[in-house]
Amino acid sequence: EDQVTQSPEALRLQEGESSSLNCSYTVSGLRGLFWYRQDPGKGPEFLFTLYSAGEEKEKERLKATLTKKESFLHITAPKPEDSATYLCAVRGGSNYKLTFGKGTLLTVNP
Amino acid sequence: GAVVSQHPSRVICKSGTSVKIECRSLDFQATTMFWYRQFPKQSLMLMATSNEGSKATYEQGVEKDKFLINHASLTLSTLTVTSAHPEDSSFYICSVSRQGGIRGYTFGSGTRLTVV
């Protein structure tokens, strides 16, 4: 069974204070690791898909990296508008099912 | 990416009644849609996979007679919560995938169901 563990559960940063979120996973035959952002009362918003160890992707202040056991979401010089819950999910095997972690609640104070 | 519309965004119903939630794929034909449920501070849990023109595939522990899924067209899937009870109160979210997930998964805006 695929498993995803995200840490920390919550993270509070000052504006401009860079940090990283962790996503550890176990999956049978990784077919994609996904990062989403979720605002309160909203559906997840797609950020990145990573497929193989060593792959990196960037978007504005966010950078996602992938190893064989974990993924990191690096946030550089965050702004208050980056405050949200960040979700990690994996797709494994031959089906379309995504397995999600519980998310990291990020709060960026001005 | 795909555009997914979910309706209603929130609904309050009385215990014992049924509630229908719609999920529409606005810009492409989705043969497969997914229904998730999310409890506060918990991860999204896949409830079922909705297949156009055939029966939905339910995850273990999800009652198919309680959560009725209909995927009658390539752009619309519906989830009906039958005989709702307070413990069914949750955030329900649909999702579509493009090219079997190769082009990612797009989520609807979610439906907050409260059963009183």
Image: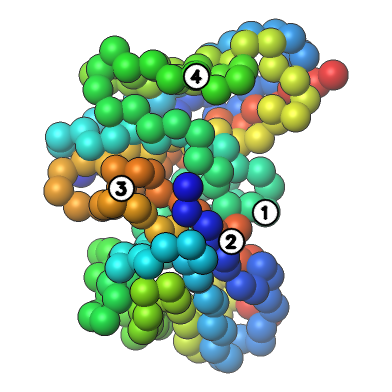
Q: Mark 1 lies on which chain?
A: A
Q: Distance between the residues labelled 1 and 3?
A: 24 Å
Q: Dot 3: what SS?
A: helix
Mark 1 highlights which residue?
A: A41
Res B110 label:
2
Give the image quarter of residue A81.
top right
**Amino acid at the residue labelled 1:** Gly
> Relative to residue A28, is residue B19 drawn left or right?
right
Q: Dot 4: what SS?
A: strand
Residue A55 in view of the camera: yes
Q: How crowded is mark 1: few (under 14 residues within 10 Å), some or many (20 or more)?
A: few
Q: Which of marks 1 and 4 is in front?
A: 4
Q: Residue at x 38, y 44 (%)?
A: B104
Mark 3 highlights which residue?
A: B101
Q: Earlier in the sequence, mark 3 or mark 2?
A: 3
**Percent position of residue A29, x then y:** 15, 34
